[in-house]
Image (tube, rainbow, N blue to C red):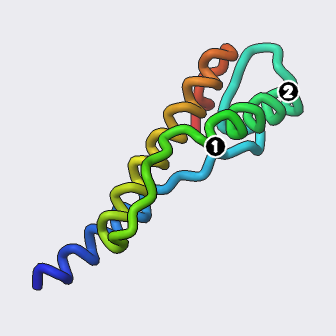
Amino acid sequence: MRAAGLVVLALLLGGCAAELGVAGREWTRPDTTISQVTFDETECARQATDAGQTPESFVGGVADAVRNAIRERGRQGAYEGCMRARGYQPAAG
């Protein structure tokens, strides 16, 4: 039963991986063209690639799911920080 709980936890944490949207619709800044927004999103996504890196785990399973969740949270935070530093705000969805 405990193993089943760990599998569920791993699946939930694995589902937390967010994509860094670069379609030009996620962020807004006054008087900015969609091509400029897309360019800035792409640059911020590129800069965030290495953020949140954690040591490689040879344990596997839940440990890797947790490590991946931490990495994705770091990437997302670096991406959002980059966009805010460029003067953008999240677009109202």
In the picture, the disc for residue 49 is 1
Image quadrant holding the C terminus, namely top right
Picture coordinates of residue 11, whole percent (x, y): 36, 71
Picture coordinates of residue 28, whole percent (x, y): 69, 25
Q: Secondary structure at mark 2?
A: helix
Q: Are marks 2 and 1 in contact (CB under 8 Å)?
A: no
Residue position for label 2: 36
Q: Quadrant of residue 25 in the image?
A: top right
In this rendering, position of residue 5 left or right of residue 79:
left
Vertical arrangement, residue 81 with respect to residue 69, above or below: above
> Label 2 is placed on what type of residue?
Gln
Q: Which one is in front, 39 or 30?
A: 39
At a point 77% along the width and 28% down the height, the residue shown is 40
At a point 34% along the width and 65% down the height, the residue shown is 12
Q: Which one is in front, 47 or 54?
A: 54
Q: Which one is in front, 21 or 44?
A: 44
Q: Secondary structure at mark 1?
A: loop
> Label 1 is placed on what type of residue?
Thr
At a point 82% along the width and 14% down the height, the residue shown is 31
